[in-house]
Structures are given as C-alpha cells and as structure tokens.
Image (cartoon, rainbow, N blue to C red):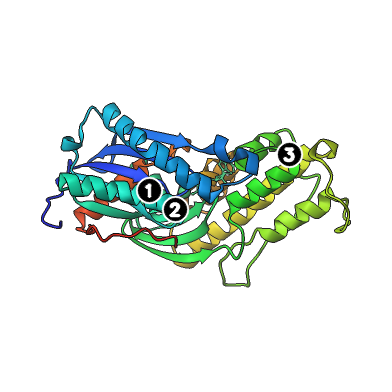
Amino acid sequence: MTSHPAPSEALVLGIESSCDETAAAVVRGGLEVLSSKVHSQIDEHAVYGGVVPEIAGRSHLRKILPVVDAALEEAGLGLDGIDAVAVTQRPGLIGSLLVGVSVAKALAFTRGLPLVPVHHIEAHVHSASMECEERPWPCVALVVSGGHTALYRAESPLAMSRLATTLDDAAGEAFDKVSWLLGCGYPGGPAVSALAREGDATRVRFPRYRPQKGELGFSFSGLKTAVLYHLRGGDALAATPEPEAIEDRADVAAAFEAAVVDVLVEQTLQACRQEGLERVLVGGGVACNGRLRRELGERAAAAGIEASFPSPAYCTDNAVMIAGLGFELLRAGRVAGLELDALAR
Ligand code: KG4
Ligand code: ZN
C-alpha cells in the first residue's frame, strides 16, 4: 500500500460515520473541496432526545452507499478518478464506525487504493486549520462536541497531544440535556442558543467548574445539576416542572450558555498561557455556538492570541475534514492494510 505515490494534487475520498451523520466528500490536494455530502440522522433520534446507537448503525447502513455515490457525482468523478480512501476509524459508536470502515475497505480493496485511517477528533482540529490563511501550527486546539470536550497541543496536523479533557459530560451533551429540561428539542445546542438570545444571562448565575491551580480540565455535570435544581425552585427533591411552566426559560438558557462558554474560554486561554502559544483552533459541533465564537475571539484577541473557527458546516461532523486530514496522512505514508479495525476509543 505504501508504494502508492501521494501527488500534491491527490484526490481523496473521505468517509465519516462515527456518530449520527453519514458523510462523504472529495477533496483535492488536501484543501480544494470538490464535493461534500452529509446525511443527518437528527429526525430519527429526536424523539429519544439523544443518539440511539442501534438506530445510528442501521441508518448508516442504509445511507452510506447513496451518500458516497452522491459525493462522487458532485465531484464529477467515478471511483477510477480517486487516489485514496480516508475513513474515520476512531473514536465513536462502534456499530456506526464499522459501517464506514467496511465500505472504505471494500472500495480500497476492489480499486487497489491506499486506505487511510483517520482519528475523528484530530480531523475536527484539522477542519479549523483548512480555512486558515497561514499554517496555524503549533497551536492549542479545543475540540468541543456532543461526545468530546478536550484541549490539545498540536505541533502539526499529524502530531497532537492531549492536555485536558472533561471529567464527565461533554459540553454538547450538557446542551442536549439542558435542552431536554427546557423543552427545546434535539439537538440541544442550536435550540438552547436560540432561546438564550431572548434571555438575560445575568438574572441567574450558575456555577463554573475550575480545576486545581495549575491544572486544566472540564466538568459540566455540576452545571447541569445546578440548572435542574434551579428549575425545581431550589428544592432538590421537588418535581421537575414541565417546560411550559418554567417562567424564566430564556434567562436560564442564557445563563447556562454563558457558564459553558466561560469555562471553555477560561480553560482554552489558560492552556495557551501554560503552553506559551498564541494560536487557537476550535472544532466540533459546539464551535457553531455564537457566544463561544464571539467571547473566545474577543478574550483571546485581548490576550494577543488569535482564535480560528471553521465555518459552521465544517464544525459539525462532515467528511471534508476526514479527506483533508487523510491527505496529510497519505503524504506521510500513514496508510493501513485491510486488517484495519474500527475502534470505539
Ligand atoms: O461535532 P458534532 O456534530 O458531533 C459529535 O462529534 O458529537 O457535535 C454535535 C453537538 C451536539 O451536542 C449539538 O447540540 C452541539 O454540537 N451543537 C451546539 C451548537 N450547534 C451544535 N452547541 C451549542 N451551540 C450551537 N450552536
Ligand atoms: Zn464530531
């Protein structure tokens, strides 16, 4: 497999199926997006208020080939025009990952193409770098999504070391759970954020997690519980009110969002100080959040740090980031054999 050249104009087909989006994209030379197709399963999971792994795996199976075909068609290519297949290998829901990995292996085998395994979280970081005018490395990277909230030191797209992670919930997961309490629906992030715009973030104050001095880290379960107790009128044992009966819904949404954003910004800037870096990349679904984009942008700038966010379509799960990072891995010869296995972690 390593005998395949990786021309600077290589056309990489990216495949993503780690959670609840089935996606495929074709990217030329690591940057030029020829096509991007995303099938979201939101409607299938919405009634449950979160992703149901069994439903996700079955839905990927139904959609993956049509999505790959659509991406090739939009790029104006057949499989014979592709130079390599990159696929999300980890982390994610195992039944979902296996669908993408199996399809990628089949395509690589039948076409004799290099197979490039991609780490989903590293791809979220890479996504932000793809829209930067200058190479942003080395930098601090914040990945903030429904499944992950972590800080990295990234020397390059291929060399990232984790600085901190969450002790419990991911930030997106906290948005989804609070959205359920406030009756905003699923996915919670965009819905809570829209409600928050109608509220006053200063009328209620929720606690912010702070790790020990000199340490980095996140925790959102205490914040979620604080929201729950607030809704119960300060009585932990009282019944949780129905969403329509909550008078200060918008204020709660705004105060919750402010608390999450405050913690994310504080820890990211602390990581920059500790690592002596003046560059930050942000990725993952929560990077769509307007308040996070504004506050991190402003507070970073005040500290002489430049923060970059991908455009919203490339914050949430997509296959452009898989093809983009796949190109870098291909150039570095980091390809896999057909024994490649999906890994949940
Ligand atoms: O990266 P992503 O598409 O999937 C994972 O890898 O998890 O992120 C999805 C998460 C969900 O939890 C969703 O509620 C959150 O990103 N999200 C947001 C916003 N848009 C999506 N959270 C806050 N504000 C938003 N505007
Ligand atoms: Zn993701």
Height in image: 242 above or below 208? above
Where residue 148 appears, as percent x and y from the top left, is: 52, 56
What crowding class fits label 2: few (fewer than 14 Cα within 10 Å), some (14-19), or many (20 or more)?
many
Residue at point 44%, 60% (across, down): 344
Q: Which residue is mark 2?
A: 95
Of 260 and 103, the residue lying toward us: 103
Q: Amino acid at mark 2?
A: Gly
Q: Assign the N terminus to one quadrant of the image.
A: bottom left
Would you say 267 lies left or right of 121 here?
A: right
Secondary structure of the residue carrying numbered label 1: helix
Q: Amino acid at mark 3?
A: Gly
Front position among marks 3 and 2: 2
Tell me the CA gap for discs 3 and 2: 29 Å
**Tag 2 or tag 3, which sits nearer the N-term?**
2
Q: Which mark is residue 99?
A: 1
Residue at point 51%, 65% (across, down): 164
Q: Are marks 1 and 2 in contact (CB under 8 Å)?
A: yes
Where residue 222 appears, as percent x and y from the top left, is: 71, 60
